[in-house]
Image (spheres, helix red, strand yellow):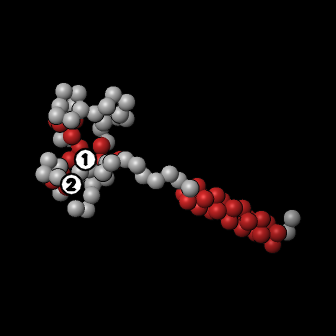
């Protein structure tokens, strides 16, 4: 195979790969996780760093807290990874 033919094949493979990534992202399901509420209970956590704010989540969302999480909830140590903060 000539150098020109190899380059052509590599370009086609690259375009197919990029097209596959594009289609995967295009048809990805919409984000369904609830955002962190922007209310007076959560206002103090809006200005903190994510890891600092996550240290306080279990005070209210523990098993015996004000608003406990469902039993099938994923790991609770990275709350703001899924529950994004709102702009206001």
Of badges 2 and 1, nearer the viewer stands: 2
In the rendered structure, the answer to whether residue 16 lies left or right of residue 55 reads right
Q: Secondary structure at mark 2?
A: loop
In the rendered structure, the answer to whether residue 75 lies left or right of residue 68 reads right
Give percent across and percent down for residue 68: 24, 32
Q: Secondary structure at mark 1?
A: helix
Q: Return the residue at label 2.
A: 38
The crowd level at tag 2 (other Cα within 10 Å; few <14, some 14-19, many 20+) is some
| Lower position in the chain sequence, tag 2 or tag 1 | 2
Please identify the residue farthest to the right as the structure is shown: 1
Name the residue located 30 percent from the left edge and 36 percent from the top edge: 76
Q: From this viewpoint, is residue 77 visible?
A: yes
In the rendered structure, the answer to whether residue 65 lies left or right of residue 36 reads left
- The residue lying toward the viewer, choosing from 17 and 9, is 17
Work out which quarter of the rendered image holds the C terminus and state it.
Answer: bottom left
Give percent across and percent down for residue 42: 17, 49
Give percent across and percent down for residue 22: 59, 61
Q: From this viewpoint, is residue 3 visible?
A: no
């Amino acid at each position: 195979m000539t150098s020109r033919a190899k380059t052509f094949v590599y370009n086609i493979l690259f375009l197919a790969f990029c097209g596959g990534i594009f289609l995967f992202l295009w048809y990805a399901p919409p984000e369904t996780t609830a955002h962190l509420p922007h209310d007076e209970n959560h206002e103090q956590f809006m200005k903190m760093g994510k890891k600092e704010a996550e240290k306080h989540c279990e005070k209210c969302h523990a098993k015996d807290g004000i608003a406990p999480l469902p039993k099938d909830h994923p790991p609770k140590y990275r709350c703001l990874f899924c529950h994004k903060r709102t702009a206001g």
